[in-house]
Amino acid sequence: MKKLIALEEAAMLALSIYLFSRLSFAWWVYLALILTPDLSMIGYMVNTKVGAWLYNFFHHKAVAIVLYIAGAYLNNEVVQLIGLILFGHSSMDRMLGYGLKYPDSFQNTHLGLIGKQKK
């Protein structure tokens, strides 16, 4: 099942790259921004509940899709770009086994445990 999920997420990552190619930005912009959603982990400096909420908000695909569609509707490529970066990053994370976080621990995700606790 994990391989099937990873394949599905890889397809969504490819979709985000394709949609990005339809925008007027240089290719390096996608590469430069693809890891920026992980800045949301700063919430873990407050506590695990705030960290999980902030992380999950910036890794939720519905947020990404709404932003992309809003950008398309408003003819605003920057908003579309933000949506695509969030969508592509979330797909990349899930492809690698990193899921949305439960509030008890950063390692406890909807895809299972990650890190040292996994063992």
Image: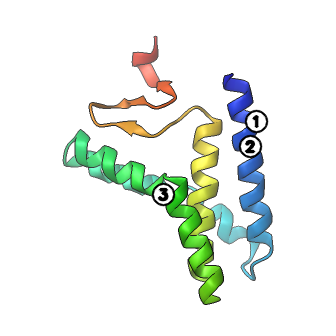
* Residue wearing tag 3: 37
Visible residue check, residue 77: no
* Residue 7 position within the rendered picture, expressed as x and y whole percent measured from the top left: 76, 36
* Residue 58 position within the rendered picture, expressed as x and y whole percent measured from the top left: 44, 57
- Total numbered labels: 3
* Residue 37 position within the rendered picture, expressed as x and y whole percent measured from the top left: 48, 57
Residue positioned most to the bottom: 75
Q: Nearer the viewer, residue 75 or 78?
A: 75
Q: Amino acid at mark 3?
A: Pro
Picture layout, residue 94 above or below residue 119: below
Counting residues from the start of the chain, the first of labels 1 and 3 encountered is: 1
Q: Amino acid at mark 1?
A: Leu
Q: Residues within 10 Å of mark 3 (few under 14, many from 20)?
A: some
**Residue depicted at 64% across the width and 55% down the height:** 88
Q: Give how far apart the Cα atoms at labels 1 and 2 are.
A: 5 Å
* Residue wearing tag 1: 7
